[in-house]
Amino acid sequence: MNSTLRASVILVILALAVGCSSTRQLSSLKEQAAAGNYAGIAAEEVTCTQGERGCNQIRLIKGDACFQVAARGDPGRWDCAIEQLGLGIDMTEGTATEMGSLQPFYENLLEALRQRRDLSRSRAEAAPLTTQLERRAQGFQGAFPAAPAGYYYLASAQLTQALDAADASPDAACRTLNDLQSLLARAPAERGRYTANFQRIEADIRGAKSTVRGCV
């Protein structure tokens, strides 16, 4: 066997080994998720990359596990949820995987970004999270235009941006706040589990308008 052929055979063997490894991990993670072993999944190392069979699902499962652990009292896992859910969504073509719709994973990504932003200790730390929340909410709206979550999380991001700009540019901030009221008015009438979220943010926008100079 010449050296070129030998190298090709080795590459094929390595590719098959990597594929088998990711398939085994996906199967294991699905079993753990079904059993509710979120802490175990969150602690598991994931190294698969774009193009490996099932890698998008592996990332989504790990991201969802990190989300569940963070939501149950470990805020240190929000960053893991953001990273892994974002990777899984970006690796997925369309709006569904073999596990079903991307929507619940996407909504968990948006909530993880909001939670992590709210834990920020400074405006500088929060700003990139707010920007990412805005971008991801816009992407969610494009994928799931009839879902209320996109409206809520987009408003959450843009409200923060308006408040950050209020002292320096009150007129622009006021325009943004008015636009947000229009945005929320266009949201689906049936808001399901986001009903309380909409009520809070609508009240926050009204409150913000009363504090921005010259805004009525």
Image (spheres, rainbow, N blue to C red):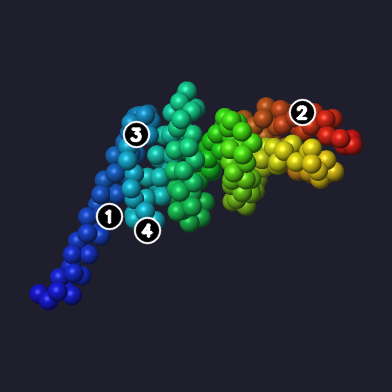
The answer to which of marks 3 and 4 sits earlier in the sequence is 3
Q: Work out how far the residue at label 1 is from the one at label 3, CA to CA, in angstroms.
A: 22 Å
Q: Work out how far the residue at label 2 is from the one at label 1, CA to CA, in angstroms.
A: 51 Å
Q: Work out how far the residue at label 4 is from the one at label 1, CA to CA, in angstroms.
A: 10 Å
Q: Which residue is drawn at the image coordinates 59% and 44% (left, top)?
A: 128
Which residue does the numbered mark 3 point to in the structure image? 43
Q: Secondary structure at mark 1?
A: helix
Q: At which x and y percent is residue 153?
A: 64, 39
Which residue does the numbered mark 4 point to in the structure image? 51
Which residue does the numbered mark 1 point to in the structure image? 19
Query: In the rendered image, which quarter contains the C terminus?
Result: top right
The answer to which of marks 1 and 3 sits earlier in the sequence is 1
Q: Is residue 149 visible?
A: no
Q: At which x and y percent is residue 80?
A: 44, 38
Q: Work out how far the residue at label 2 is from the one at label 4, CA to CA, in angstroms.
A: 45 Å
Specify the amino acid type for callout 4: Gly
The answer to which of marks 2 and 3 sits earlier in the sequence is 3
